[in-house]
Amino acid sequence: MIEALLLALAAHAPLQGPSVSPRDRDPWVFRSVLDQRPRIVTLALNEEMWVAYDAQTCGLYKCWKGGVDLKGAVYTTVHGDQPLTRGPVYTLGVDGVVWGRRRTGRRST
């Protein structure tokens, strides 16, 4: 009896998926050379806030407000140029290895 009632209620309930806000940019995550640094993963957090990570070291590269000038053969068919950040920088990451582990008191990467 209860199962039939639940099935009847479920049949009349509207189906709703999770609420997802639209992104200001598509794609909002991409990998490229950025500011002459290879293997950078760039995320557009919203229309003006951006963050980039070094895919090789898994460390923060830069957080800034502004955007990315998408230059280069992939974007403009002009060879030689590469994507560049534009706008004020909020923070910069640390160059080099940022993650590690300790084994018997010594650091290894």
Image (cartoon, rainbow, N blue to C red):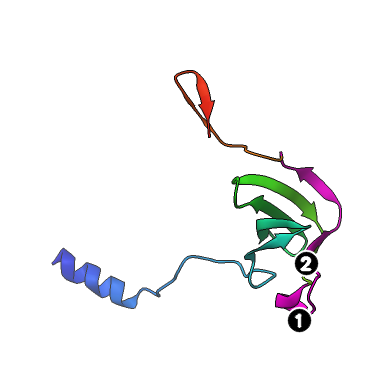
Question: Residue most toward the front?
Answer: 80
Q: Is residue 107 above or below residue 20?
A: above
* Circle 2: element type: loop
Q: Position of residue 102 (x, y in %)?
A: 49, 25
* Circle 1: element type: loop
* Callout 2 amino acid: Gln
Question: Residue most toward the left?
Answer: 1
Number of other residues with Cα within 10 Å of mark 1, as a class: few under 14, some 14 to 19, many 20 or more: few
Q: In the depicted view, which residue is nearer to us: 39 or 3?
A: 39
Q: Which residues are magenta?
A: 72-94
Residue 77, disc: 1
Residue 68, disc: none
- What residue appears at the point 62 percent right and 70 percent down from the top-left corner? 22
Residue 97 lies in quadrant: top right
Q: Position of residue 76 (x, y in %)?
A: 77, 79
Q: Position of residue 86 (x, y in %)?
A: 84, 60
Residue 12 lies in quadrant: bottom left
- What residue appears at the point 70 percent right and 76 percent down from the top-left corner? 74
Number of other residues with Cα within 10 Å of mark 2, as a class: few under 14, some 14 to 19, many 20 or more: many
Q: In the depicted view, which residue is nearer to us: 2 or 83?
A: 83
Residue 66 lies in quadrant: bottom right
Q: Position of residue 108 (x, y in %)?
A: 52, 30
Mark earlier in primary sequence (2, 1): 1
- What residue appears at the point 80 percent right and 46 percent down from the top-left corner? 90
* Callout 1 amino acid: Thr
- What residue appears at the point 86 percent right and 52 percent down from the top-left corner? 88
Residue corresponding to mark 2: 82
**Contact? badges 2 and 1 (CB < 8 Å):** no
Q: Is residue 11 magenta?
A: no
